[in-house]
Image (cartoon, rainbow, N blue to C red):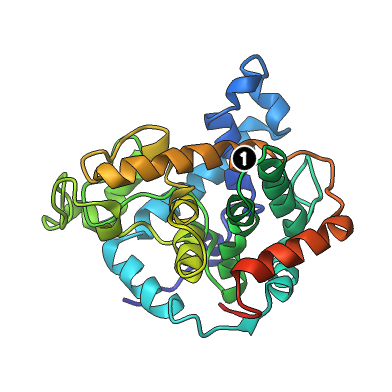
Amino acid sequence: MSQEFTEKEMAPLASIEEWEDDLLVRYPDPADKDKSKEEYRNYVDSDRVATVREFYRLNHTYQTYDFVKEKEAEFLKFDKKEMSLWDAVDFLNTLVDDSDPDTDLDQMQHLLQTSEAIRQDGHPDWFVLTGFMHDMGKVLCLFGEPQWAVVGDTFPVGCQHSDKIVYPEFFEANPDSKNKEYNTKYGVYEPNCGLDKVKMSWGHDEYIYQMMKNYLPEEGLYMLRYHSFYPQHKEHAYDHLMNKHDHEMFKWVDKFNPYDLYSKVPVAPDAKALRPYYEDLVAKYLPSTLKF
């Protein structure tokens, strides 16, 4: 399957971080239950809603079962670039722009905010590394992928789209919604088959999971693979595909979720001072170079 995308389709958001800003409105920190959504991000609601809606219109239209298989074949060969993790962080930092009204932190600092919050709470070092790595898959944007194929709430493809997914009305334009093989409750899957047998919409979660699957414990891999699967860990929309093991592992996804959503603050971590700790941590678990 080959598709051509217009400039609008390539960049419906001002920044890929705008999706995460929208998450804070939809899923505010329970600890800040009295905080108004305006305090999370200072966007004019009409503009924010319009750009996020356009993002999900594209995402829900084009994320088909065949599209996912095509992207897996294209990117999971990991033949685009080979570099050290630190070179990869520098590469990822080229995504930084000044469209976020609350922070001008680069990607390295955002990753450090997540991982340092995890470390300060005394979690195992592999958990800290998982936090540091969780958004590394956004390098897909630098390989020419449109935003809607990099970020966004993820969901299973190859079966009926849940009405718990954000903006479910946009699935009307998705060809799979008219395909009898894919538009039933279970689609191509069996009841409680387990998520390892389920294809998820394509994006940075699956990409970084596949990159890290030989290096991190299973708990960390679940965090990487499903940290954007909000229809399940916030809405429990896909219990019918999950097995007992998935539910046990999702306890770790739930542990990770607050660090991902609520650790972003305007104070920059001291990356220079923290670098030696992370160099040792990376060397403990990862090879000297990674293939992207």
Query: Which residue occupies 44% across, 62% down?
Result: 206
Query: Which residue occupies 48% across, 58% down?
Result: 217
- Quadrant assignment, res 161: top left
Q: Name the residue under label 1.
A: 259
Residue 105: x %, y % from top left = 80, 51
Q: Which of 271 and 264 is in front in this view?
A: 271
Residue 138: x %, y % from top left = 59, 62
Number of callouts: 1
Quarter holding the C terminus is bottom right
The correct choice, above or below, for 116 with respect to 262 in the image is below
Question: Which residue is at the far top?
Answer: 34
Relative side of 136 to 160, left or right: right
- Quadrant assignment, res 285: bottom right
| Whether residue 93 is visible | no
Query: Which residue occupies 72% across, 51% down?
Result: 110
The correct choice, above or below, for 40 with respect to 198 in the image is above
Check disc 1: other Cα within 10 Å, few if <14, some if 14-19, many if 20+: some
Residue 180: x %, y % from top left = 11, 55
Relative side of 153 to 17, left or right: left
Relative side of 168 to 40, left or right: left
Q: Is mark 1 on a helix, strand or loop?
A: helix
Residue 106: x %, y % from top left = 77, 56
Which amino acid type corresponds to the residue marked 1 in the rendered image?
Tyr
